[in-house]
């Protein structure tokens, strides 16, 4: 089912957790949802699908130039090589940070996010404040996240949508070129792949 980008979020009650619980209760009572299946789904997104997947993609790209080239030309296919695919990750684009450009990702309309590689979006990513300020004053937002840009770097903001989900390929930290992929992945935080942190900085 495609994600409806024009869902009227503003019409939702102010407490989404309460609403979700009410919906779950009704669906279970009507026999439409198996609580065990629901728990398994939530467990999967909390423990198996998360930023650790994206970190493995980034580490592979740093360690393997051929993989990096494939990642930048067809991210969906390259990410699938590591076994990460599925809902909200069908059309991936990877944008590379360099000394000339720092990329950051937002969804100005709602909360589109690459689930197979980053899991569930953090609350701040879904906030009205981030969604508007990331576009209007990205440098100020980055400063608040503690990102120190190079004087040479322009900031490019990518607006995710139901069609395309972006993942930032951070710059590889100095002195990490001898590390193996497992150690490299430990340098890659969720925020580094959204663009609101640098690799190795958290
Ligand atoms: Fe969205």
Image (cartoon, helix red, strand yellow):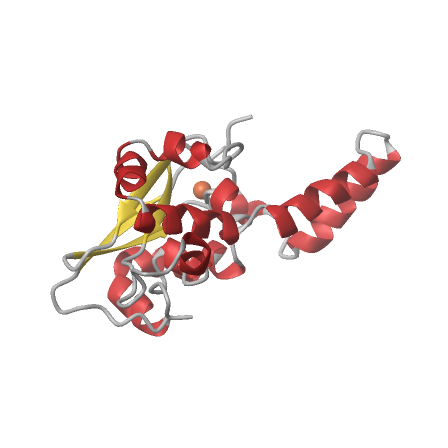
In the picture provided, is 84 more to the left or to the right than 161? right
Q: Does residue 107 show up?
A: no
Image quarter hosting the N terminus: top right
Q: Does residue 15 show up?
A: yes
Image quarter hosting the C terminus: bottom left
For the point 24% across and 54% down, which residue is it?
97
For the point 82% across and 43% down, which residue is it?
25
| Ligand 1 image position (quadrant) | top left
- Of all residues, the one furthest to the left in this rendering is 152
Q: Position of residue 133 (x, y in %)?
A: 33, 61
In the picture provided, is 120 more to the left or to the right than 81? right
Residue in front for this viewpoint, 181 or 165: 181
As displayed, is residue 109 above or below residue 104? Answer: above
Q: Position of residue 58 (x, y in %)?
A: 37, 50
Q: Position of residue 140 (x, y in %)?
A: 28, 69
For the point 48% across and 54% down, which residue is it?
126
Residue in front for this viewpoint, 162 or 94: 94
In the picture provided, is 2 more to the left or to the right than 21? left
Residue 75, image quadrant:
top left
Q: How many marks?
A: 0
- Of all residues, the one furthest to the top in this rendering is 1
As displayed, is residue 111 above or below residue 33? Answer: below
For the point 74% across and 42% down, which residue is it?
40
Q: Position of residue 121 (x, y in %)?
A: 51, 52
As displayed, is residue 32 above or below residue 41? Answer: above
């Amino acid at each position: 089912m495609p994600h409806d980008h024009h869902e009227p979020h503003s019409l939702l009650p102010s407490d989404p957790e309460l609403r979700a619980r009410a919906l779950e209760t009704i669906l279970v009572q009507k026999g439409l949802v198996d609580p065990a299946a629901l728990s398994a789904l939530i467990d999967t997104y909390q423990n198996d699908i998360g930023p650790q997947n994206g970190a493995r993609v980034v580490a592979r790209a740093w360690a393997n130039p051929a993989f990096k080239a494939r990642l930048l030309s067809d991210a969906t296919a390259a990410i699938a090589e590591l076994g990460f695919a599925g809902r909200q990750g069908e059309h991936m684009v990877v944008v590379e940070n360099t000394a000339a450009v720092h990329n950051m990702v937002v969804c100005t309309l709602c909360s589109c996010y690459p689930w197979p590689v980053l899991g569930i979006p953090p609350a701040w990513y879904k906030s009205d404040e981030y969604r508007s300020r990331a576009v209007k004053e990205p440098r100020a937002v980055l400063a608040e996240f503690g990102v120190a840009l190079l004087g040479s770097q322009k900031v490019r903001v990518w607006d995710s949508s139901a069609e395309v989900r972006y993942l930032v390929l951070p710059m590889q930290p100095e002195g990490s070129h001898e590390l193996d992929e497992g150690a490299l992945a430990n340098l890659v935080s969720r925020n580094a792949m959204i663009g609101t942190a640098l690799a190795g900085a958290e």
